[in-house]
Image (cartoon, rainbow, N blue to C red):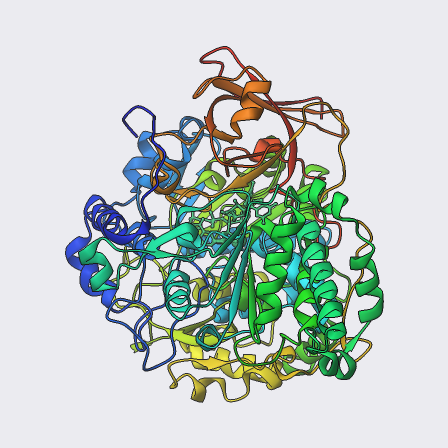
Amino acid sequence: MSGSSRFKPNSSPAGGWGALNATARILREQSVIAQSTTTLLKMNKPGGFKCSSCAWPNPTPGHVKTFEFCENGAKALAFETTRKRVTREFFAAHTVSELRGWSDYDLEQQGRLPEPMRYDATTDHYVPCSWDEAFADIASELQALDSPDEAEFYTSGRTSNEAAFLYSVFVRQFGTNNFPDCSNMCHEPTSRGLPKSIGIGKGTITIDDFAKAEAIFIIGQNPGTNSPRMMTNLVEARHRGVPIVVINPMPERALMKFTEPQNAVEMATGGSTKIASEFVHVRIGGDIAVLKGILRALLEADDASRAAGTGALIDDEFIATHTHGFEAAAAAARATGWDEIEAVSGIDQAQLARVAHIYAQSKATIICYGMGITQHQRGSNAVQQIANLLLAKGNIGKPGAGIAPVRGHSNVQGDRTVGIDEKPTQIYLDQLEQVFGFRPPQEHGHDTVEAVEAMVAGHSKVFIAIGGNFIHAIPDTPIAYEAMSRLKLSVAVSTKLNRGHVVHGHKAYILPCIARAELDIQNGVKQRITIEDATSMVGASSGILEPASPDLISEIAIVCRMARATLPDSAIPWEDYEGNYDLIRDKIAAVYPKLYARMNERLDEPQFHLRNSAREREWNTPSGRANFLVFDGIAMDKPVDVEGMLRLATIRSHEQFNTTIYSNNDRYRGVYNDRMVVFMNEDDMKARGITVEGPVEMETVSLDGARRWLGGLKALPYPIPRGSVAAYYPETNGLLPLYHHDELSKTPAAKSIPVLVRPSTPGAAGSAIQGM
Ligand SMILES: Nc1nc2c(c(=O)[nH]1)N[C@H]1C(S)=C(S)[C@@H](COP(=O)(O)OP(=O)(O)OC[C@H]3O[C@@H](n4cnc5c(=O)[nH]c(N)nc54)[C@H](O)[C@@H]3O)O[C@H]1N2
Ligand SMILES: Nc1nc2c(c(=O)[nH]1)N[C@H]1C(S)=C(S)[C@@H](COP(=O)(O)OP(=O)(O)OC[C@H]3O[C@@H](n4cnc5c(=O)[nH]c(N)nc54)[C@H](O)[C@@H]3O)O[C@H]1N2
Ligand SMILES: [Mo]
């Protein structure tokens, strides 16, 4: 990428013409505009294909607009449907060692992968190979392992329900539950923490609840960038006068002011909508303190209201009928001192009382949250404290109310529902045995952190990934590289070239697949796949574009052929599944009769809702009730007693999709042509003798004696609370220790890395991790 860095604070509304211009530019650059304008109109429409970007739900029929895509959905599509190809000539011209020196941006810019490739160690090049050759070799490596548990089977959240389901059946028949997946780094605190509260690890709202909500909270989530279609719902809510409470250490532009690109009047007049009616400028890791503070203020207001004879503010009847543990949670909140709350969160009692008032007045409240909540050492506890607050007013299972974990990848929730789970339930395992007639392994498998540990220790020898870019998504980048390089075999099912292809095992294969927007025809019949969004809505998706190359096959075909080659004695009709995806859905329906009965028939509806027990006020917990859970303490992360320590949140720019970087700009935060920046409070900069845009380095306060260090950064003064700093992921993943994760779910605590930031000599770039 060219151009010098430029930093210019941005105070204009997010969205608007800027978003439309950016959309046009990205389509032009990827030279697909002619193809993509009509293609874009098919996005998220019945009969069309689902956007491959985020997991935000589509509107219900009757509310669908001409364009059901956003700036970042268009970017995802443009990158997926690019005309560029990574040809065999390209691989012949560059050794893999040379490609390892390229940036991630440059690797992805080479375009779509058109044919399967095998790594040739004698020449250090990727060379073309046939599909059969690839599957035969992968099968023989898998069969040669001493135990199936020596292989790791990763899934990223773009994979369809059908492919994920078959993959989970294949891997379990092979004999392991080693299913590290991107969800382990993302909403695992929701999947593991929330069932203890409400009996299900999913959100309870549907998109229609937004139109009925009387208050909305957005905690640790940046929808203007990461789920932009959500902005439409927020703008509509504000126009109805609904208060929106934003809790975030960064005043994200779109949450302050937003111009809705679909609103002709706002676009024409330069108007915009103020989104946050209350901005809670919390310190990194201060959310449990804030949540306890709001609960305490609510209880005190409730006391006062009862004493004044004006009635209760909390929902006594719901608490009595549906919940367990209220007294203890209320006592814990009341016992938390205001001084302590203010010190940890940086928020004063008066603001928390205002927020509690908004909450008390609302008869239906939705609380949305993202990575700012989950990626902490007590991320699961924070999720449970959100549930406490909702339960106090009966805000689960009533119209316009509920908990809304905003999922990341477009099908990350669906993949988990259909079996991608390293800790499967016994009910599921028994059901699988009954439907497919083999006994699945009963022991739990590895999550992402455990997979890396097993790879480094040499216990795991094969790594197979359906999608994603594992080694740049996980912590401790140099350890991840080492883990990958030690493997006997690495296999990546991918669409674009990425780091996981050039850092690889002794043997390596790249298996390219058809993308979501492309036609998938089997036996002359156009196939559909399905995905589940963040609100448990399932819909069909069928691509409309010619595949990027005639040699590509679908993810489903890849799984089926890998299974046939690896398990020659399997009685499962893999070939039939590859030829007709309806047959896969029949089996999904058989394994999940409560959720997916009549799945194929239901696909004729634009979308259908998977039954959500908590939404029905059915509580699948041991107590049979929703549980208020006590968290002893107040901090989201363990204290670190080191002078000058700051908490680093690693976040996404407006121009990336996880490890895929669209450009080096971050328009809403006023950063251009640079990603090596640290957003800092001005007083923190002064205290360290750091100048504006001055060169800095960061070092992790490590507990294991290793030195994790990153140089070549520039400090930018930013409205972020003292003690908190932010920088971009994945460049900073070398600073995130593998051991630094949520206690319950092992989700890496990527939002709260303890670091020291200091001035450095200009040009001192590089990174290091020493002494492991
Ligand atoms: N365009 C685009 N869309 C995406 C993605 C993408 O990369 N690009 N990624 C997808 C994926 S996989 C996911 S999981 C989601 C991620 O979507 P988000 O959850 O929005 O992800 P982040 O940008 O990592 O961080 C969210 C916010 O957390 C705030 N934050 C940091 N620390 C704290 C804290 O201690 N407390 C609070 N309250 N807030 C904090 C940050 O300031 C930031 O605004 O988006 C999905 N959608
Ligand atoms: N420090 C830090 N680390 C983080 C996070 C953070 O906030 N901070 N966030 C975490 C989160 S929330 C997540 S979800 C993970 C993301 O981790 P991953 O899901 O592993 O990473 P992605 O960057 O989304 O994967 C991108 C790659 O997917 C492939 N791909 C794209 N489309 C398709 C497709 O249709 N099929 C197939 N087979 N492949 C495809 C392309 O080759 C592309 O290079 O990262 C985690 N890591
Ligand atoms: Mo994610």
Q: Quadrant of residue 95?
A: top left
Counting labels gives 0
How far across and down, in percent of the image, does residue 725 sit? 56, 33
Q: Position of residue 737 (x, y in %)?
A: 67, 35
- Residue 620 sits in which quadrant? bottom right
Image quarter (top left, top right, bottom left or bottom right) of the N terminus: top left
714 or 320: which is nearer to us?
Answer: 320
| Residue 471: image location, x then y, percent | 55, 41
**Residue under the image location 23 percent in, 51 percent down:** 17
Q: Residue furthest front?
A: 308
- 633 vs 250, left or right, is right
389, 22: nearer the viewer: 389
Residue in the picture at 64% in, 49% down: 448
The reply to whether residue 176 is visible in this rendering is no
Which residue is at the front of the view, 191 or 653? 653
Q: Which residue of the protein is positioned furthest toward the top in this rendering?
A: 761
Residue 66 placement, left or right of 363: left
Please name whichever residue, 221 or 288, is drawn nearer the observer in this view of the structure.
Answer: 288
Q: Is residue 180 visible?
A: yes
Q: Is residue 125 above or below residue 134?
A: above
User: Could you tell me residue 612's position as x and y percent?
Assistant: 60, 79
Question: In the rendered image, which quarter contains the C terminus?
Answer: top right
2 relative to 183, above or below: above
